[in-house]
Amino acid sequence: MMKNFLGFILLFVILLFIGFRPINFRFGDMVIYNIEFEKYVNGAAFDTKKEFLFESFKYFFAKNFSATSFFFVCAFLYITPLYFATKKLFVDYSFYAFFLLVISFSFWAYATNGIRNGIATSLFIFAITRDSKIIKWSILLAIIFIHKSILITVIIYLLVSKFNYTKAYLLLWFICIPLSLVLGSFLEQFFLGLGFADEKLKVYLEGVDQVQEGVTLVVGFRWDFLLYSAIGVFASWYFIFIKKFEDKTYSLICNTYLISNALWILVIRVSYSNRFAYMSWFILALVIIYPLLKSKIFENQHKVIGLITLFYFSFTYLFDFILN
């Protein structure tokens, strides 16, 4: 009972804190969205070149509500799907999973900066926890029209739904490291040639003018990000093959993570590499915590969960406050 209450309080506080943040330059893309929002307020025509569902949502709010309301609903669409997804998966132990998602390294950034991407990935998590295939795949189809990059994740999820080969996906992840080290530039150009990249993605892959962007970017082979990603790889291997934890949903989550993260490794050197890594990082917390909330794996399991939570948060603290 207390854990459920804590989960609701956490949801309420975070929603208010993020939903009513000020509109200013500290939140990156938020300023851009606000400029586009004001253009619609002042009578600009609907932009048909952008993702239809999110753009329609923005256009509707610009014609009927304030920018503050728009960003609050964006926060609502980002945070509440995670809350209800964890409630569906873990019931009485949902607080632990929801809390781990909230303290994830990428959580704050995609609540305030990469807003469309954050909404799409949260709805992805919500979708894969639905029992109804119609509801699940309707949501997965819809989120493509919020942020096109989620299409890659949806395709991967469809693939692993048909082919449950975790050992092969683990091997693929390790193979991608030397491939990226040797063939990094070639693979980036190959990815561009496939036609999946929109204009913004092409800018990231081809490099950005750091002076124009107003930032100093750390580029090159990101060993720090790779180490962070390896947590999920280790967890997948340990729980599935060492602890023999068998759960269809967990296998799907792990396999989706492994392939998505492996693809990121291939383009690890690009500017804003974290934006590519996020397409796997957004489910990392579930990869880590899922078995511990579904099965008795360790003695003193609550203590183990506490230590894992502290360890996981240490990466967020390290990346956001020490290395940033």
Image (spheres, helix red, strand yellow):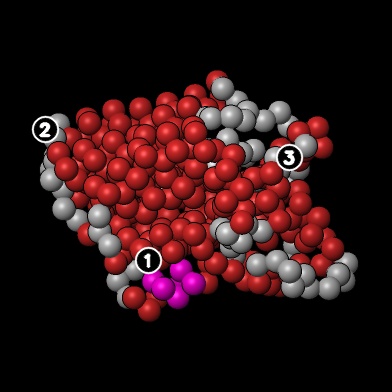
Left or right: residue 178 compared with residue 205: left
Label 1 SS: helix
Between residue 117 and residue 88, name the one nearer to us. Answer: 117
Q: Quadrant of residue 220?
A: top right
Magenta-colored stretch includes residue 139: yes
Q: Measured from the top left, where is residue 37 in percent x and y?
A: 78, 61
Q: Measured from the top left, where is residue 149 in percent x and y?
A: 56, 58
Q: Amino acid at mark 1?
A: Leu
What residue did someone put label 3 on?
208
Magenta-colored stretch includes residue 56: no
Between residue 84 and residue 214, name the one nearer to us. Answer: 214
Mark 2–mark 3 distance (CA, rounded to whole Å): 50 Å
Q: Check the image and report above or below for 166 versus 222.
A: below
Left or right: residue 243 compared with residue 235: left
Identify the disc placed on residue 323: none
What residue did someone put label 1 on?
158
Mark 2–mark 1 distance (CA, rounded to whole Å): 36 Å
Which residue extends farthest bottom? Answer: 134
Between residue 110 and residue 76, name the one nearer to us. Answer: 110
Label 2 SS: loop
> Mark 2 or 1 closer to N-term?
1
* Magenta residues, dominant SS class: helix
What residue did someone put label 2 on?
299
Q: Measured from the top left, where is residue 38 in percent x and y?
A: 82, 60
The label nearer to you, 2 versus 1, is: 1
Label 3 SS: loop
Instruction: Tell me where the magenta segment starts and ends, as one range.
Output: 136-141
Left or right: residue 316 compared with residue 230: right
Q: Amino acid at mark 2?
A: Glu
Mark 3–mark 1 distance (CA, rounded to whole Å): 33 Å
